[in-house]
Amino acid sequence: MINAELLKQLIDFRRERDWEQFHNPKDIAISLSIEAAELLEWFQWRDKTEIQQLLATDKREALEDEIADVAVYLSYLCHDLNIDLEQVIKRKMHKNAEKYPVDKVKGRADKYDEYS
Protein backbone atom coordinates (compact mmCIF):
# COMPACT_ATOMS: atom_id res chain seq x y z
CA MET A 1 0.00 0.00 0.00
CA ILE A 2 1.24 3.44 -0.81
CA ASN A 3 0.32 6.75 0.72
CA ALA A 4 -1.90 9.33 -0.97
CA GLU A 5 0.98 11.62 -1.92
CA LEU A 6 2.87 8.88 -3.74
CA LEU A 7 -0.32 7.73 -5.47
CA LYS A 8 -0.89 11.30 -6.66
CA GLN A 9 2.67 11.33 -8.07
CA LEU A 10 1.94 8.08 -9.95
CA ILE A 11 -1.32 9.41 -11.34
CA ASP A 12 0.28 12.73 -12.32
CA PHE A 13 3.21 10.89 -13.97
CA ARG A 14 0.77 8.87 -16.07
CA ARG A 15 -1.42 11.86 -16.90
CA GLU A 16 1.54 14.04 -17.96
CA ARG A 17 2.54 11.37 -20.49
CA ASP A 18 -1.04 10.87 -21.71
CA TRP A 19 -0.85 7.17 -20.86
CA GLU A 20 -4.32 6.98 -19.31
CA GLN A 21 -5.65 6.23 -22.78
CA PHE A 22 -3.77 2.93 -22.70
CA HIS A 23 -4.50 2.07 -19.10
CA ASN A 24 -7.82 0.28 -19.11
CA PRO A 25 -8.37 -2.28 -16.33
CA LYS A 26 -7.77 -5.27 -18.62
CA ASP A 27 -4.42 -4.02 -19.84
CA ILE A 28 -3.30 -2.91 -16.40
CA ALA A 29 -4.17 -6.37 -15.04
CA ILE A 30 -2.18 -7.94 -17.89
CA SER A 31 0.76 -5.65 -17.14
CA LEU A 32 0.51 -6.50 -13.45
CA SER A 33 0.69 -10.20 -14.30
CA ILE A 34 3.69 -9.67 -16.59
CA GLU A 35 5.54 -7.71 -13.92
CA ALA A 36 4.72 -10.38 -11.32
CA ALA A 37 6.18 -12.98 -13.68
CA GLU A 38 9.33 -10.88 -14.02
CA LEU A 39 9.52 -10.84 -10.23
CA LEU A 40 9.22 -14.63 -10.17
CA GLU A 41 12.00 -14.90 -12.72
CA TRP A 42 14.34 -13.27 -10.22
CA PHE A 43 13.89 -16.31 -7.93
CA GLN A 44 13.73 -18.99 -10.61
CA TRP A 45 16.35 -21.75 -10.28
CA ARG A 46 17.83 -20.23 -7.12
CA ASP A 47 17.81 -21.77 -3.68
CA LYS A 48 17.51 -19.86 -0.43
CA THR A 49 21.28 -19.43 -0.07
CA GLU A 50 21.70 -18.10 -3.61
CA ILE A 51 18.86 -15.65 -3.07
CA GLN A 52 20.43 -14.37 0.15
CA GLN A 53 23.76 -13.95 -1.62
CA LEU A 54 22.16 -11.99 -4.45
CA LEU A 55 20.35 -9.76 -1.99
CA ALA A 56 23.74 -8.71 -0.66
CA THR A 57 24.93 -7.53 -4.09
CA ASP A 58 24.07 -4.64 -6.38
CA LYS A 59 21.54 -6.99 -8.07
CA ARG A 60 19.19 -6.34 -5.17
CA GLU A 61 18.08 -3.15 -6.89
CA ALA A 62 16.82 -5.19 -9.85
CA LEU A 63 14.58 -7.14 -7.48
CA GLU A 64 13.39 -3.93 -5.86
CA ASP A 65 12.58 -2.51 -9.30
CA GLU A 66 10.41 -5.54 -10.11
CA ILE A 67 8.59 -5.20 -6.79
CA ALA A 68 8.04 -1.50 -7.52
CA ASP A 69 6.63 -2.30 -10.97
CA VAL A 70 4.12 -4.72 -9.42
CA ALA A 71 3.13 -2.13 -6.80
CA VAL A 72 2.72 0.61 -9.41
CA TYR A 73 0.40 -1.43 -11.62
CA LEU A 74 -1.60 -2.61 -8.61
CA SER A 75 -1.90 1.01 -7.46
CA TYR A 76 -3.13 2.10 -10.88
CA LEU A 77 -5.65 -0.73 -11.00
CA CYS A 78 -7.04 0.06 -7.55
CA HIS A 79 -7.18 3.78 -8.34
CA ASP A 80 -8.93 3.29 -11.66
CA LEU A 81 -11.49 0.83 -10.24
CA ASN A 82 -12.01 2.92 -7.11
CA ILE A 83 -10.87 0.08 -4.84
CA ASP A 84 -9.57 0.90 -1.39
CA LEU A 85 -6.70 -1.56 -1.14
CA GLU A 86 -6.42 -1.28 2.63
CA GLN A 87 -10.12 -2.04 3.08
CA VAL A 88 -10.15 -5.04 0.72
CA ILE A 89 -7.06 -6.47 2.44
CA LYS A 90 -8.75 -6.13 5.83
CA ARG A 91 -11.88 -7.84 4.51
CA LYS A 92 -9.83 -10.65 2.96
CA MET A 93 -7.86 -11.14 6.19
CA HIS A 94 -11.16 -11.58 8.05
CA LYS A 95 -12.23 -14.22 5.51
CA ASN A 96 -8.85 -15.94 5.76
CA ALA A 97 -9.06 -16.03 9.56
CA GLU A 98 -12.35 -17.92 9.25
CA LYS A 99 -11.08 -20.18 6.48
CA TYR A 100 -7.78 -20.98 8.20
CA PRO A 101 -8.38 -21.27 11.96
CA VAL A 102 -5.10 -21.32 13.88
CA ASP A 103 -5.96 -24.49 15.79
CA LYS A 104 -6.39 -26.43 12.54
CA VAL A 105 -3.71 -25.00 10.28
CA LYS A 106 -0.81 -23.84 12.43
CA GLY A 107 2.40 -25.20 10.93
CA ARG A 108 0.60 -26.81 7.97
CA ALA A 109 0.74 -25.86 4.32
CA ASP A 110 -2.42 -27.70 3.31
CA LYS A 111 -5.09 -26.02 1.24
CA TYR A 112 -8.17 -25.07 3.26
CA ASP A 113 -10.19 -27.99 1.89
CA GLU A 114 -7.51 -30.56 2.83
CA TYR A 115 -7.68 -30.34 6.61
CA SER A 116 -10.46 -31.28 8.98
Image (tube, rainbow, N blue to C red):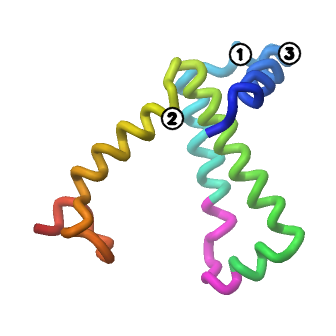
Residue lying farthest to the left in this orientation: 116
3 or 2: mark nearer the eye: 2
SS label for mark 3: helix
Magenta: main secondary structure: helix
| Percent position of residue 83, x then y | 50, 24
At x 45% / y 31%, what residue is drawn?
A: 87
Q: Relative to the observer, which residue lies in front, 33 or 80? A: 80
For residue 59, what is the image quadrant? bottom right
Q: Tag 3: Cα neighbours inside 10 Å, few (<14), some, or many (≥20)?
A: few
Three-letter amino acid code at the position of disc 2: Glu
Quarter of the figure that contains the C terminus: bottom left
Q: CA distance from mark 3 to mark 1?
A: 9 Å
Q: Is residue 90 left or right of residue 3?
A: left
Magenta stretch containing residue 45, yes or no?
yes
Q: Which of disc 1 and disc 2 is earlier in sequence?
A: 1
- Over which residues does the magenta segment extend? 40-50
- Front one among 93 and 57: 93
- Image position of 50 with respect to 44: above or below: below
Instruction: Say which residue label 2 marks.
Output: 86
Query: If you read the primary sequence from the N terminus, does the residue marked by circle 3 or circle 2 appear first?
Result: 3
Q: Which residue is mark 1?
A: 20
**Where is residue 29 shown, x and y percent of the image?**
55, 33
Pair 2/1: label in front: 2
Left or right of 29? Residue 103 is left
Residue 96, relative to residue 30: is it above or below? below
